[in-house]
């Protein structure tokens, strides 16, 4: 050992690698005496060093800080990465087909499952007898949450396909256990046995905490940390919203983009709503698209709490063409009035007499269109009407096809026939359909000239589904993703339309190919002045070539010749493409996507303090009744077959009994009785044979030479005592 006095050495985390720590830990020289490893392998102390060592340590600290600064993630790089990632996954929307029933958002949801799900959420006791779970995994998650919250050792004792049980992992006399099994009537997993009192002392261990479970728990913790980062980014994005708007105006001349704010108590500008309409989009729509606008609102996810309002048109290939969008705090009548007023001004809609509006039946939207565009044709979305009808008629299988056929009727005669079919099917459903005013959403009563036969707002909802990932981002990354996806959409369709060979778009080519099959079956009779009488499937229609109309109503509504007109053109030797509306021409299709929105500079140019910062708004109140914790002073009225509430005994095993269950007859299948009491299929009553009465058998007959003990035969316990006493 050296005579030199011991000096403390301090090693910083940035100074020593894991390998160096291992070497120093095994070193027994005087340079590393009395190392204390209580703080872990990264930082350890042994004394104070000389001035030279202190200077060297300070130098290393400065280098370490520089390294940390260099390793910090660049906010702008993260911004570009998130937007680029979403745009890279963009897939162009498909064409909107004719007479295709759109997918329902909740048609697969069983109302019974929804009810049970609400009940499960409301119940505070997770292990209450009768508590239901959709899957075994859901039940196991609840047990894991219990073990972590209460620090209990829980072990799984049973996990079959339809049965699962957990017990206390301490063993001994502790009786804690929970048993859950599949219940066929409810078609869910139900807690049937529970004993929720521990008689043991926790030891800090838990047997169900295996490596995969621990890994998943750390992932969940990471998600919570990520949510905190998202909230910080959320506030930063709102702060620089004015700089982003100025960049839109600079890079895309004559575009409309602005933000509305209000002052809070501290005098800061709080975000209220945002609107953007690019100049190239509105001019292309006005010059080459049909006069149709779909309006819809969709909720934003995770980061931004609010609603995205969109206005979408249809191009020559019957694909969506976004025109304008806005972000508001909630879908109120005031916000809809504001949005409709803006698109009216930017698109030159005037009183709306030359345009068609398609939307759902939102009250705020209905009043906004009626106020700002009083003469516009406002079509109701049939998909939303069917969803409303399903609330009272969910079990009627023919609801959807009958209502869709009613909406697809091209003329009043077909409308009346489909309405009569609906009435014959179910009178109650017919009455509810009439309350929905079917003349506002049936093709038979649409105006002529828009060349649009759509009866649903599927185009706008298709756009909302395309931006699903964008809706989960912070405000400016979300808006940038929508803008860049729009650029990519225009670029792809520009290339597609340029490569298309044909006089009209792909949409028209597919429809004419489909109608050609029916046109070949038509029998035509020519009249004067270009008038034809066309027979098909036992019915005839009148076709007038000079006026481009057919008595079926399809041709004049869509702008594409129907099967009757197509058949007459084949007979007359005419080219069907000469009678298709110019709205569908390839030239018009190419004009739709001739020019895209101009590229914008990144956030390094506009994310600075040169603009007045905007504060993120408080979280908006959700619509509907507010939840209250006040308990009712009256007890719930129980059903006919429910058992009365019994008082719990302290520390008793609870089991799910048969009380409260509704019995069903095995003969007729009805509830309320069993097979023995069935009136439809009564069982024959069989008389029971009574047992012979107890007799006293004494061996008194027949010349017995020996006298044995008395023999007693017993059949009823009530008589046995009497006979025994008699003997």
Image (cartoon, grey):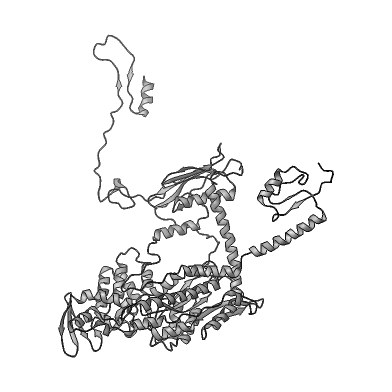
How far across and down, in percent of the image, does residue 452 sit? 34, 80
Measured along the vertical axis of the image, is residue 88 above or below residue 315?
above
How far across and down, in percent of the image, does residue 692 sit? 28, 28
Q: Residue furthest bottom?
A: 529
> How many numbered tags mark residues here?
0
Nearer to me, 300 or 703: 300
| Quarter of the rendering containing residue 540 | bottom left
| Quarter of the rendering containing residue 363 | bottom left
Q: Is residue 356 visible?
A: no
Nearer to me, 355 or 515: 515
Would you say 44 lies left or right of 381 here?
Answer: right
How far across and down, in percent of the image, does residue 100 sit? 32, 71
Would you say 180 lies left or right of 517 here?
Answer: right
- Which quadrant of the figure contains the N terminus? top right
Q: Residue at x 70, y 45 (%)?
A: 25
Q: Is residue 166 visible?
A: yes
- Which quadrant of the figure contains the C terminus? top left
| Quarter of the rendering containing residue 559 | bottom left
Measured along the vertical axis of the image, is residue 363 above or below residue 148?
below
Nearer to me, 430 or 30: 30
Q: Residue at x 30, y 18 (%)?
A: 698
How far across and down, in percent of the image, does residue 327 sit? 52, 76
């Amino acid at each position: 050992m050296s005579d030199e006095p011991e000096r403390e050495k301090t090693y910083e985390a940035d100074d020593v690698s894991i390998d160096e720590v291992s070497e120093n830990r095994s070193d027994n020289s005087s340079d590393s005496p009395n190392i204390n490893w209580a703080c872990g392998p990264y930082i350890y102390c042994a004394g104070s060093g000389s001035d030279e060592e202190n200077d060297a340590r300070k130098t290393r600290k400065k280098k370490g800080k520089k390294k940390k600064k260099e390793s910090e993630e660049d906010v702008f790089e993260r911004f570009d990465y998130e937007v680029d990632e979403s745009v890279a996954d963009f897939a162009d929307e498909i064409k909107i087909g004719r007479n295709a029933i759109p997918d329902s958002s909740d048609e697969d949801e069983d109302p019974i499952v929804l009810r049970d799900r609400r009940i499960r959420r409301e119940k505070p006791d997770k292990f209450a007898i009768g508590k239901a779970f959709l899957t075994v995994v859901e039940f196991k998650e609840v047990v894991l949450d219990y073990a972590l919250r209460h620090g209990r050792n829980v072990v799984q004792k049973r996990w079959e396909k339809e049965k699962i049980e957990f017990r206390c992992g301490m063993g001994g006399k502790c009786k804690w256990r929970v048993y859950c099994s599949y219940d066929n009537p409810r078609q869910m997993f139900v807690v049937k046995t529970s004993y929720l009192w521990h008689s043991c002392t926790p030891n800090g261990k838990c047997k169900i905490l295996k490596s995969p479970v621990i890994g998943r728990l750390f992932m969940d913790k990471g998600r919570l940390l990520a949510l905190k980062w998202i909230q910080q980014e959320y506030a930063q994005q709102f702060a620089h919203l004015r700089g982003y708007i100025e960049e839109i105006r600079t890079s895309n001349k004559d575009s409309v983009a602005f933000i509305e704010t209000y002052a809070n108590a501290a005098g800061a500008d709080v975000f209220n709503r945002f609107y953007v309409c690019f100049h190239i989009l509105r001019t292309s729509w006005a010059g080459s698209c049909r006069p149709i606008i779909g309006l819809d609102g969709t909720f934003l996810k995770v980061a931004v709490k609010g609603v995205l309002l969109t206005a979408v048109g249809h191009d020559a290939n019957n694909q969506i063409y976004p025109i304008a969008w806005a972000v508001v705090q909630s879908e109120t009548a005031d916000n809809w009035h504001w949005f409709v007023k803006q698109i009216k001004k930017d698109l030159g809609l005037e009183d709306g007499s030359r345009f068609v509006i398609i939307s759902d039946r939102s009250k705020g939207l209905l009043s906004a269109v009626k106020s700002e565009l009083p003469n516009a044709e406002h079509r109701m979305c049939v998909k939303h009407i069917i969803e409303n009808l399903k609330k009272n008629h969910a079990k009627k299988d023919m609801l959807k096809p009958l209502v869709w056929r009613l909406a697809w009727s091209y003329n009043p005669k077909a409308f009346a026939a489909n309405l009569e079919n609906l009435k014959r099917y179910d009178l109650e459903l017919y009455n509810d359909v009439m309350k929905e005013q079917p003349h506002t959403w049936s093709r038979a009563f649409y105006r002529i000239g828009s060349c649009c036969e759509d009866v649903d707002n599927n185009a706008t909802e298709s756009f909302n589904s395309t931006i699903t990932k964008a809706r989960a981002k912070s405000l400016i990354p979300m808006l940038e993703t929508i803008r860049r996806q729009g650029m990519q959409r225009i670029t792809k369709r520009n290339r597609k339309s340029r490569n298309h060979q044909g006089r009209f778009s792909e949409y028209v080519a597919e429809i004419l190919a489909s109608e050609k099959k029916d046109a070949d079956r038509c029998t035509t009779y020519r009249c004067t002045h270009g008038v034809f009488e066309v027979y098909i499937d036992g019915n005839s229609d009148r076709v007038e070539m000079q006026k481009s109309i057919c008595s079926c109503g399809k041709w004049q509504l869509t702008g594409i010749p129907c099967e009757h007109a197509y058949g007459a053109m084949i007979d007359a030797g005419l080219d069907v493409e000469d009678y298709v509306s110019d709205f569908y021409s390839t030239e018009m299709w190419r004009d739709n996507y001739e020019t895209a929105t101009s590229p914008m500079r990144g956030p390094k140019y506009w994310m600075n303090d040169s603009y007045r910062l905007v504060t993120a708004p408080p979280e908006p109140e959700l619509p509907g009744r507010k939840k209250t914790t006040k308990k009712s002073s009256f007890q719930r009225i129980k059903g006919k077959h429910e058992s009365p509430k019994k008082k719990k005994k302290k520390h008793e095993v609870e089991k799910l009994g048969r009380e409260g269950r509704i019995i069903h007859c095995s003969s007729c299948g009805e509830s309320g009785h069993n097979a023995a009491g069935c009136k439809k299929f009564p069982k024959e009553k069989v008389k029971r044979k009574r047992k012979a009465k107890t007799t006293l058998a004494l061996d008194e007959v027949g010349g017995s030479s020996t006298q044995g003990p008395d023999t007693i035969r017993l059949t009823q316990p009530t008589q046995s005592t009497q006979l025994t006493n008699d003997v």
